[in-house]
Image (cartoon, grey):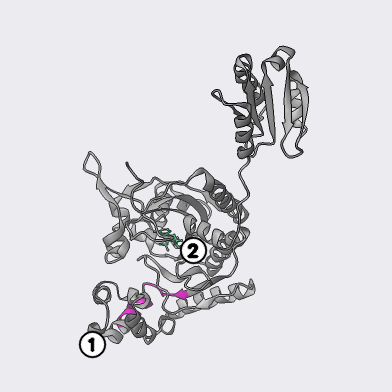
Amino acid sequence: MYKAPRGTVDILPADQDYWAYVQQRAADVCRLYGYQRLDTPIFEDYGLFARSDAAGTDLVEKEMYVFEDRSGQKLTLRAENTAPVCRAYLEHGMSSLPQPVRLYYIGPTFRYERPQAGRYRQHHQFGCEALGDASASLDVEVIELALGFLSSLGLRQLSVLLNSIGCRECQPQYVEVLRRHYQGLSAGVCDDCRVRMVRNPLRLLDCKEPTCKLIADEAPRISDHLCPACQEHFQEVQAQLNLLGIPFTLNHKLVRGLDYYTRTVFEILPQREGGQSAIVGGGRYDGLIEQIGGRPTPGVGFATGIERIILNLKEQGLQAPPLAAPTVYLAHVGEAARRAIVTLAATLRGQHIGVLASTGGRSLKAQLRQANSFGVCYTIILGDDEVQRGEAVVRDMAANSQATVSLDSLPAHLGRS
Ligand code: HAM
């Protein structure tokens, strides 16, 4: 027996109401803020993700699905969507459009991670990117949008964590300060952190190992080492969040796992006990477009995992509105009726009435049970006698009543629901 590959899940019909709900809310909130949808391919050139600046990140070193196609081209299943969006921005000359260009995406994303609740090897991201404008108000806009989206789903008790990790000027200076802090401590940190000390010192700050955490707690804060321009930008982000009444917590250890961030970084987490998995992660990436071959162009955005959102909706007891069931179940009794429902179904569907037509030779009782389980509004019962008379019995499922209706007036009768 084959099973879905480890870390992947089938999204069954029973869960589709959640998926449709979340995606519809995402589209609604994006329309409200003027973000337009962009769909990029599921696989991209390997080099788009494995840029020299990205060396040392878990994403590139451990998590990407990399393969060669039949022509020998090295490709990667997309491991995140910000670089593909930036690639598309450059490829389609979007820098000549009025800036910022506001885009959003919804789609599968692939990471070879250790699967657990809320962490999969294929997950689906909804994300927004605003390109071509460095204003702090855009950082605030994407945070507000992400929160607006989550609260439109009914999610409550969320925390916003915020930090600034500086720019190309001040971040390297801070990294030196951090290296000095860790000098002589390599015996006290985990194996991963020993590698980070050399390759990616900022990530030392968010190691989850208890002993490493203690050392990171004592580390110098990047906020004390920002250049004046980054300092001003960060102050402005905080001032505007306050203006909007959006509570946030400054967290000097928040650095994010991807390489491209500059200045603002943020995460949104559930407040529940042990709720350590971020629902939303994002920030500013003013150097990324240049790294992939464009002119220096600022950008800011976020992404959220739809699976994690649905887990949180269920944990908070929030139901998605059920997807509309077909209006009608067509049951038949007898040979002539079995034939007649084929054309009747076609006629009703032609009138935009959703129909589930009974197949096979089940008893009427079994057909009625099935109609009930599908949640239809009406069950139409057609027997051979009714076919002869040009009539049908229409059962209103909610009212638990039934009436005999001529076949000609069925669409009008059902339209009265
Ligand atoms: P990220 O924090 O790596 O950021 O992922 C964003 C969100 O995707 C996470 O907060 C989480 O909800 C979800 N997620 C990530 N990995 C998994 C997984 N293995 N299983 C289930 N859900 C997952 C990014 O990807 C950045 N591109 C976000 C961004 C956009 N920054 C700026 N713009």
Q: Is residue 169 left or right of residue 185?
A: right
In the rendered structure, which amino acid carries the disc numbered 1? Gly
- Percent across and percent down for residue 187 are 22, 84
Q: Is residue 39 visible?
A: yes
Any atom of ligand 1 within 8 Å of the CB at mark 2? yes
Cα–Cα span, label 2 and label 1: 36 Å
In the rendered structure, which amino acid carries the disc numbered 2? Ile
User: Which residue is identified by label 1?
Assistant: 184
Q: Is residue 266 left or right of residue 45?
A: right
Residue 348 found in image quarter: top right
- Observer-nearest of 249 and 259: 249
- Asked if 318 appears above or below 254 in the picture, the reply is above
Q: Residue furthest top?
A: 388
- Mark 2–mark 1 contact, CB under 8 Å? no
- For the N terminus, the image quarter is top left
- Percent across and percent down for residue 274 are 47, 73
- For the C terminus, the image quarter is top right
User: Which residue is identified by label 2?
Assistant: 279
Q: In this view, does 47 lie to the left or right of 231?
A: left
